[in-house]
Image (tube, rainbow, N blue to C red):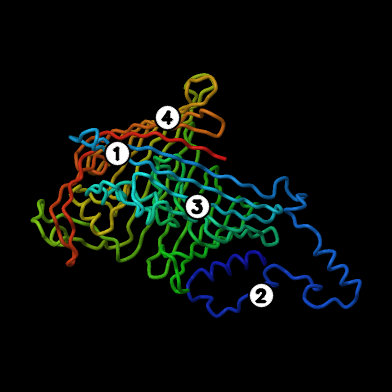
Amino acid sequence: MRAAFLLLALGAAAIPGLAADAPRASEADLFGAPAAAAAAPASADAAAGLASELAKPDAFARGDTVADPLQIGGIYYQQWNAQFQDGGSLGSTPWSAPLQLDVFLDARPNDRLRLFVNSRLLYDPTKDQNGNPTQASSSSLVESELSGGTTTTAASNPQALLDQAWLKFDMERTVFITAGKQQVKWGTGHIWNPTDFLNAQRRDPLQPYDQRLGSPMIKAQLPLDSHQSNLYALALFDNPEAASTLQQEGGAFRAETVLFNAELGADAVTRAGMSPQYGADISAPVGPVDAYAEAALLSGPGNASYQRTTITAAPGAPLDSLYKSQGLPGPALQASAGLVYDFAWRDNRQATLGGEYFYNELGVENRGLYPILMFTGRYQALYAAKHYAALYLTAEGPDEGKHTSYTLTNLANVSDGSYESRLDLAWVVLENLTFGAYVAGHYGNQGGEMDFSLRTPALSDNGRPIPAMDVADVPVEGGLSLRMGF
């Protein structure tokens, strides 16, 4: 009963102002303080006993609580990517060489306490010290928009970042607390993840792992083992920018359970100054396939539909003269659903075939609105249109040592009729060292999201000049990479 009360108390504190007048617990209340440490010992024997306790080495020095109380490791990930523009010469082909180095410390002095810190270094030798391409072009102005913003835009080059820094412990082995900057992902979608409310950026589904930075929060988990359920309450310290006042903080709640072999989840998130968001997800085996779905309801006055009012724009035209917007009458729906089928494509070789569909009520159906969304800061890659679909196949390679794998991913923007097909190779050349290569083709309606190109005259937005844009079509792109875990 006391553990449930602690979970509810954390949830109340996550709502700004609800627990503002509650007295702050002392350090002794939180961690417990032995009576001998609270006052001077009453005798020489007591003093000797206390000195003996203080002289004992800690758990890291003893090493008798866990086999390895402190682990150090990380990931080295070097990429070389090139975009072959339509009509461009080989010498003018844009390329980049982003390097990402993660180093983590994982301390576990006992089975009830864990500290994890992951730092990140970003560097790209093809960019200057401010993170801009050395050969500036109008295409560089929309580069981060087209990539989905999943990689952090460097304010300096190189740039040092803190990815995660959290402390995990339990209260009476009943409620489990994780406090600090951490990665938490909700939902079941593989490509589209509308209920991923806790992350400001969307995950890039074409990357080999999630490269987004963690978010600052306190998470409390209450497992209900007898009911095969979990309850979560979170206090959020971003909005999604850093919350520097108590009224900027937010809260989130989630419940998970298992019912008739189906895993169900429901969640809600609220942040100060923003309307609540609600989500639900399900995954279950259906015969030989695994089915999954998730849906998000996004409330608030900011939900709107957009319509282009003119096809061509005169030089210097105000941006708001090119479109009109209309607020949606109720909450906006975003939903994804998919099927996954695992099978043996030959003896001792596995493959996975998957398909997914995404409906986005906030999306547009006219590709001429993409520049408007970009210039007004509303564009989000793979979430800009109303209808999307994906089909992917991944398989272990035929080599004897199972050192290779192949992935073919097909993404379709159904609304604008543009497509991307990408083939990835992963080859474990040495233990802990993986070589990667990919080639991707963009086709369909030119100017669509998957086959993007842009040509606009100089415009203005509330007196702010917007330079003319001329972004060439990229029918083919490719890249190589080296990834080492240590």
Query: Residue at label 3?
Result: 265
Mark 4 and mark 2 lie on one chain; the one further toward the N terminus is 2
Mark in front: 1 vs 2: 2
Mark 1 and mark 3 lie on one chain; the one further toward the N terminus is 3
Q: Which mark is residue 425?
A: 4
> What's under tag 2, amino acid-wise?
Ser
For this view, does 110 lie left or right of residue 472? right
Of the pair 424 and 393, the residue shown nearer to us: 424
> What's under tag 4, amino acid-wise?
Leu
* Mark 1–mark 4 CB contact (< 8 Å): no
Q: CA distance from mark 1 to mark 2?
A: 56 Å
SS for dot 4: strand
Q: CA distance from mark 1 to mark 3?
A: 28 Å
Q: Residue at x 41, y 39 (%)?
A: 79
Q: Which mark is residue 26?
A: 2
Q: CA distance from mark 3 to mark 2?
A: 35 Å
